[in-house]
Every structure is written in structure tokens, then in C-alpha cells.
Amino acid sequence: MTRDEILKLESYLQKTFRLADIQVRQRPQKDDSAEVYIGDEFIGVLFRDDEDEDETAYQFQMAILDFDLQ
């Protein structure tokens, strides 16, 4: 993802979740995705989906482990 995409996604997530601590960071050696953090804690990955020529979409994937729910 480009730096411009990352900044737009970060701003979108901060506004949507009303959380200024959300950060979107480039992934080393990956250009189709970025990592999402709250503070220093990794929470998930954003993937760019541009298979449709007319449209780009982004998918957010977050795993919630069972022991995190306790």
C-alpha cells in the first residue's frame, strides 16, 4: 500500500472507531496489506482488494483468541 493509502485508512479507522490511538503501519516486504495497531498492540491486518478494475476495497482481518475473552 502506498503511504497515501495508509494515511487515509488510518484517518478513516480513527474516525469510525473514535479512537485516536489506532495506527496503520506498512508491512515489511508486502505491498498489498498493512498492519493495524492500537498503541503498541498489534490487532489485525488490512488487505487491499483491487480485483475489480473500477473499484478498490479494503478488508480488515482481526483474530480474537479464546484466552483473550477471559
Image: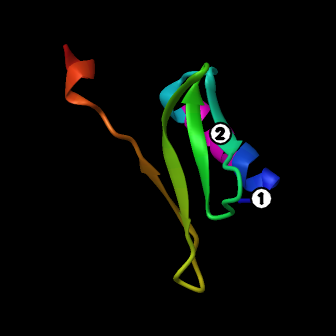
Residue 40 image-quadrant placement = top right
Q: Are marks 1 and 2 in contact (CB under 8 Å)?
A: no
In the drawing, what numbered circle is on residue 24? 2
* Residue under the point 52% across and 34% down: 16
Locate residue 8, reporting x and y percent. Answer: 71, 47
Question: What are the residue bounds of the magenta stretch?
Answer: 8-15
Mark 2: amino acid: Val
Q: Quadrant of the C terminus?
A: top left
**How many residues crowd around disc 1 within 10 Å: few (fewer than 14), some, or many (20 or more)?**
few
Q: Earlier in the sequence, mark 1 or mark 2?
A: 1
Q: Is residue 65 above or below residue 2?
A: above
Magenta region's main secondary structure?
helix
Give the farthest residue toward the bottom: 53
Q: Which residue is mark 1?
A: 2
Q: Is residue 55 above or below residue 65?
A: below
Q: Is residue 15 above or below residue 53?
A: above
Q: Element at badge 1?
A: loop
Residue 63 image-quadrant placement = top left
Is residue 2 left or right of 24 when viewed as pictured? right
Locate residue 52, reporting x and y percent. Answer: 52, 83
